[in-house]
Image: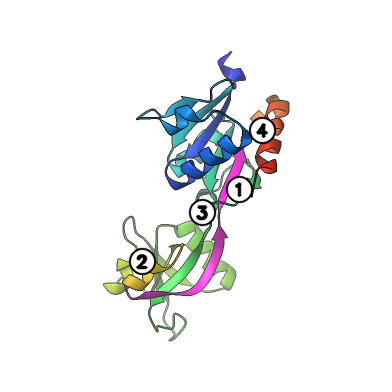
Amino acid sequence: MENKKVRIALTKGRIENKAVDLLEKIGYDVSELRNKGRKLILSISGEDIEVVLAKAADVITYVEHGVCDFGIVGKDTIMEHGGKFYEIADLGFGRCRFALAVKEGADFFAGYGVKTVATKYPNVTRRHFEEMGIDVDIVKIEGSVELAPLVGLADGIVDIVETGTTLKENGLEVFHDVAPISARLIVNTVSLKLKQERILEIVDKIKENLE
């Protein structure tokens, strides 16, 4: 009976809240999701749907390995990690962008030396500069990437920018945009064959209720 359930992996945090709103809009009972406590696997009452809460990169892993049929995850994670799944829909929430930021007034392209870029997203950054035909050194940072130009570690950073307030407060500014980001609906390739009817029914409901 268990494998007949449809399992959706949600990215914990901001995307999770918007995804729960969307599931409620569709008409699902999301009371257990709203009052989840510390639970990580939750049920939608009256439906054959289970919801799994996970970190963004793990959402992709769960969908790829087929333990979850669906995932709701940011395009930033998809761009950085890739994977074998179908990207079915742009859900329209969680909108922000990848951008290259530098110290205020700095020209990233000035001079002849190879520039250093600090980022949490080395794959996105590498692809972007390869497409531009520019050679850069990439330094992976785990914490506050804004620090890197301030302490002289990097000439610029590639990071997610929503309002730009954090950049401004740290004396940085957007030099140019890299790519737009929003939450996406992804589906396991095998699930789409084995549970096609049920999955397409849910996908249609989601698409009908997008703003």
Q: Quadrant of residue 196?
A: top right
- Amino acid type for the residue under numbered disc 2: Thr
Quarter holding the N terminus is: top right
Helix, strand or loop at disc 4? helix
Q: Give whichever of discs 2 and 4 has the lower sequence position.
A: 2
Which residue is labeled 1 in the image? 91
The answer to whether mark 4 and mark 1 are in CB contact below 8 A is: no
Q: Give whichever of discs 2 and 3 has the lower sequence position.
A: 3
- Amino acid type for the residue under numbered disc 4: Ile
Q: CA distance from mark 2 to mark 1?
A: 26 Å
Front one among 39 and 136: 39
Relative vertical location of residue 141 with respect to residue 204 in this rendering, above or below: below
Identity of the residue drawn at 48% across and 63% down: 125
Helix, strand or loop at disc 3? helix
Q: CA distance from mark 2 to mark 3?
A: 19 Å
Which residue is labeled 2 in the image? 166
